[in-house]
Image (spheres, rainbow, N blue to C red):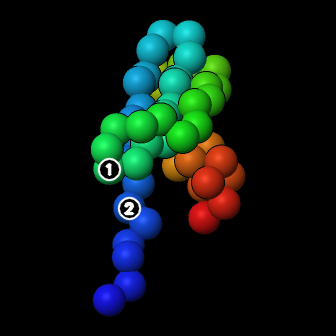
Amino acid sequence: MEKQNKKIIGVDIGGTAIKFALMDTQGIIEKKWSIPTNISEKGRFIPAEICSSIRSSIKV
């Protein structure tokens, strides 16, 4: 049986920065990064920027 390589992504949305952590299933942090919080248009772009950052950071 093939072992699955499961990961957990934590996201903290703050007023000035969005912080990310990539962890294994044991909670060990493998990578941390952050991007500025884009509050233009009442934060309309935040979800798309979160997805984009995750995709580019973990090469999905």
Label ID, residue 25: 1
Label ID, residue 6: 2
Name the amino acid, label 1.
Thr
Above or below for 5 versus 21: below
The answer to whether any part of residue 7 appears in the image is yes
Above or below for 25 versus 60: above
Q: Could you say whether the residue bearing mark 1 is in a helix, strand or loop?
A: loop
Q: Which residue is drawn at 62% across and 43% down?
A: 53
Q: Could you say whether the residue bearing mark 2 is in a helix, strand or loop?
A: loop
- Where does residue 38 sit, x and y in percent of width and height? 59, 23
Name the amino acid, label 2.
Lys
Apparent side of residue 31 relative to residue 12 in the rendered image (left or right): right
Q: Do labels 1 and 2 touch, CB within 8 Å?
A: yes
* Structural distance between the alpha carbons of marks 1 and 2: 7 Å
The answer to which of marks 1 and 2 sits earlier in the sequence is 2
Dot 1: few (<14), some (14–19), or many (≥20) neighbours within 10 Å? Answer: few
Residue reaching furthest to the top: 15
- Where does residue 40 sit, x and y in percent of width and height? 58, 22
> Where, quadrant-wise, is the C terminus in this rendering?
bottom right
- Where does residue 12 sit, x and y in percent of width and height? 41, 24
Q: Which residue is drawn at 43% across and 66% down?
A: 5
> Where, quadrant-wise, is the N terminus in this rendering?
bottom left
